[in-house]
């Protein structure tokens, strides 16, 4: 505290800057549609028209600055949820994140913005119109609720990315792993159209150009084909490829890859990609057996804690926690993610942030300082 006051005392201009910022903040709060945290009616009614509400302004946090000499990077934790369609999960995670000052990322499946009747509006690359490996958005009321959830997320500073549309994994051929760049461009173009249509007609406070990356279905894809399409769409990050241990994001082909780490699962004495489905598969071949829910929750929590500790004490690489909005295995993995978000985001030197925030933070650093951490070995639990 004292070092901060003396630094401010040495720089009287700071007070002017703060005063100016306060005045500007007041202006923003008085501007209609700005500063509201829960746009739209809370009763599930139709959302407001797009033109009445400007996008929310989310202030940068204290840690969004270059590191001071000798200071370690904050331990970033990136909670990311694929699908991002479930109202129940949005409600739970939005409330929890607010209570621990966390930001997270929802990777939206684009067809969740289409009602079931609108399914012919989507044609996956190489598939028939209306075909998909996951459900569509349900009724018009369910889609409207989803739009409100997404708006609440955006207003609270969370990030919306893409989980693409049809979720075609190996076996649902042609699956994403077989798509050419042209196929990916088609898929991304349709995702963008669903988002912009929802913006124009359903009051979604998000445009296709706000979406800057995401996660592929089942972490699959031929990257040599997918990445050029992502780049053409203006995407700046992906979070699908596995890394051995917790590793700093790497720039591949103009895209930041936020790796999905293989980490030690203490309960299994082996390494697994730290994603709910992959853990579930290793626990019991992804059979839906709720009787082991508590055991899986504890084993997953222990995995998160071990990986976090290894990164915190090691290279401080951002830790990606990949999950879905689902209740697999009796909700075991949701409870693990919620438990970990609740405990880790409130820890010292720890920031639960979005991909956009971590990307911006990296861009503010002295490359030589960041390189020192990047060149450390990927964090591995002992
Ligand atoms: Zn998925």
Image (spheres, helix red, strand yellow):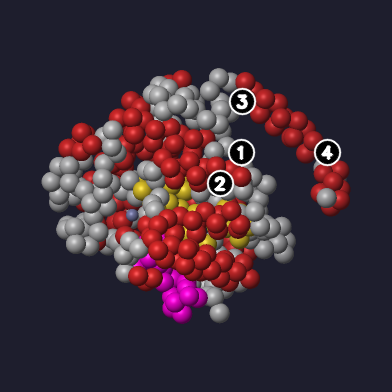
Q: Earlier in the sequence, mark 3 or mark 1?
A: 3
Tell me, yes or no, whether the two marked residues, 4 and 1, touch with CB atoms within 8 Å.
Answer: no
Q: In x, y percent, where is residue 378?
A: 52, 72
Residue 300 in sight in this render: no
Q: Earlier in the sequence, mark 2 or mark 3?
A: 3
Q: Is residue 183 above or below residue 207?
A: below
Quadrant showing the C terminus:
bottom right
Q: Which marked residue is nearer to the observer: mark 2 or mark 3?
A: 2
* CA separation in Å, label 4 and label 2: 39 Å
Q: Which residue is mark 4?
A: 12
Q: Which residue is mark 3?
A: 28
Q: In x, y percent, where is residue 48?
A: 42, 22
Q: Earlier in the sequence, mark 3 or mark 4?
A: 4
Which residues make up the magenta segment?
A: 262-281
* CA separation in Å, label 2 and label 3: 27 Å
State ligand 1's quadrant: bottom left
Where disc 1 sits, the SS reads loop
């Amino acid at each position: 505290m004292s070092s901060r006051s003396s630094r401010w005392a040495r720089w009287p201009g700071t007070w002017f800057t703060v005063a100016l910022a306060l005045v500007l903040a007041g202006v923003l709060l008085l501007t209609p549609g700005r500063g509201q945290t829960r746009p739209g009616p809370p009763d599930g009614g139709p959302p407001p028209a797009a033109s009445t509400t400007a996008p929310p302004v989310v202030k940068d946090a204290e840690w969004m600055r270059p590191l001071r000499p000798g200071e370690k990077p904050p331990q970033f934790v990136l909670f990311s949820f694929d699908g991002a369609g479930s109202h129940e999960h949005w409600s739970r995670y939005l409330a929890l994140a607010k209570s621990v000052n966390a930001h997270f990322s929802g990777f939206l499946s684009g067809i969740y913005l289409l009602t079931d009747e609108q399914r012919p509006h989507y044609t996956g690359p190489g598939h028939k119109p209306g075909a998909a490996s996951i459900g569509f958005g349900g009724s018009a009321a369910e889609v409207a609720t989803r739009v409100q959830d997404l708006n609440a997320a955006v207003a609270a500073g969370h990030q919306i990315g893409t989980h693409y549309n049809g979720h075609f994994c190996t076996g649902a051929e042609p699956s994403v792993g077989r798509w050419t760049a042209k196929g990916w461009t088609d898929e991304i173009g349709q995702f963008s159209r669903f988002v912009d249509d929802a913006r124009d007609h359903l009051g979604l406070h998000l445009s296709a150009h706000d979406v800057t990356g995401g996660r592929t279905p089942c972490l699959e894809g031929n990257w040599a084909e997918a990445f050029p399409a992502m780049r053409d769409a203006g995407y700046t990050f992906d979070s699908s490829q596995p890394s051995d241990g917790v590793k700093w994001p790497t720039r591949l082909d103009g895209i930041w890859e936020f790796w999905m780490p293989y980490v030690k699962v203490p309960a299994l004495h082996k390494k697994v990609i730290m994603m709910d489905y992959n853990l579930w598969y290793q626990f019991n071949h992804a059979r839906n057996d709720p009787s082991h829910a508590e055991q899986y929750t504890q084993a997953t929590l222990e995995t998160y804690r071990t990986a976090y500790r290894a990164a915190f004490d090691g290279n401080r690489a951002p830790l990606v926690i990949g999950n879905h909005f689902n209740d697999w295995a009796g909700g075991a993995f949701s409870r693990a993610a919620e438990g970990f978000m609740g405990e880790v985001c409130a820890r010292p030197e720890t920031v639960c942030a979005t991909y956009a925030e971590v990307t911006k933070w990296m861009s503010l650093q002295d490359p030589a300082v960041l390189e020192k951490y990047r060149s450390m070995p990927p964090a591995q639990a002992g």
